[in-house]
Image (tube, rainbow, N blue to C red):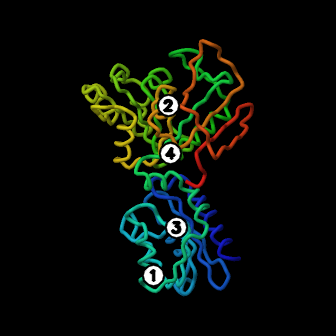
Amino acid sequence: MNDEDLMGLAVAAAKQAGVATWRNPQVGAVVVKNGHVLATGHTQPYGGPHAERDALSQLAPEQAAGATLYVTLEPCNHYGKQPPCTQLIIDSGIQRVVVAQLDPHALVTGKGVAALRHHGIEVVTGLGTQQAAQVNPHYNFFYRHHRPWVTLKQAVSLDGRVSAGPGQRTTITNQAVYRRVHKERAGFQGIVIGSTTAIVDDPTLVPTPQLAHLPIRIVLDRRGRLADYPDRQLFRDGLAPTWVFTERKSLPDRLGPRARVFVLPDCSVPAVVQVLAEEGVQSLYVEGGPTIQNAFARAGLVEEVLTYLSPVMLGQEGVPGFAPPKTWKFQDQQLELLGNNVRIAERERQDV
């Protein structure tokens, strides 16, 4: 196997890490010596060992000495919830490290590679970069652009409606879509809705399967309407954190300890996104209705649109879905059939 094949194994290992890594990137590592793969590893659930430590922990010291390590993301060179991976690599006697992608996190970028080279380890970078980057689009985007990745998700009828009428809860898509959306939510750190969705649909917004770190349920409630609805499931089920953004100064007192309330002088989408960036939220799944989604679109804060299309027609009384302020053309489009519904995933580019 050549370097490209072995890095492919590392990318495959990275994908096995899954969303349990939460705010840490999903990373894969492969240790090779004399043409033989000795160990593979991946990032463990948040707070646990990184990929390099996971792989090297499977080997005796004499096995790692003189080996090559393939890793999908630059090894860290700082203390966090785990000690530096660079020091572990140096101490293990690894002679060569092949890195697919430099870490966009300013705390890491270039420092891990520099530390390894300083200790005489050969480091090769840039092999399989695109494939590795595709494993962590939200993480990469957050640290490159200093704001969360935003995905708009809508379920629409064939005639472009999201409900049968204003204030009406309407089931549009099938059970296959229902299951897919519940699974999809787990890949994001925040799920966004507006106050109308919270009041009318009374959702829990909890993904399936359950995770140690569930997405934060974020409600945009500029006028503070939720003061009259403290019985919504978001405030009483205790399943996941709930954050509310409002301009109404009395809302924190009205909701009490049920939610974390952010009172902003300007509760616009850009202002909310800025606060979420400062709070370290890397990705948003915007499930709110067309009003919220139109606000994100007008603000130019959309990286991806997921449309679930159902072959039903709700008629002229139905509420139209969101519409961007101008023509949107996406370079990367993927269609998938879910029973008699269609999932359309669109983003500007794939190698984000």
SS under mark 4: loop
Marked residue nearer the N-terminal end (1 or 2): 1
Q: Could you tell me which residue is drawn at 46 percent across and 75 percent down?
A: 113
Give the foreground label among 2 and 3. 2
Q: Could you tell me which residue is drawn at 62 percent across and 79 percent down?
A: 32
**Marks 1 and 3: CB-CB under 8 Å?**
no
Which residue corresponds to mark 3?
51
The mark found on residue 117 in the picture is: 1
Marked residue nearer the N-terminal end (1 or 3): 3
The mark found on residue 188 in the picture is: 4
Amino acid type at image mark 1: Arg
SS under mark 1: helix
Amino acid type at image mark 4: Phe
**Number of marks drawn:** 4
Which residue corresponds to mark 2?
293
**Marks 3 and 4: CB-CB under 8 Å?**
no
Q: Quadrant of the N terminus?
A: bottom right
Distance Cα–Cα, label 1 vs label 3 = 20 Å
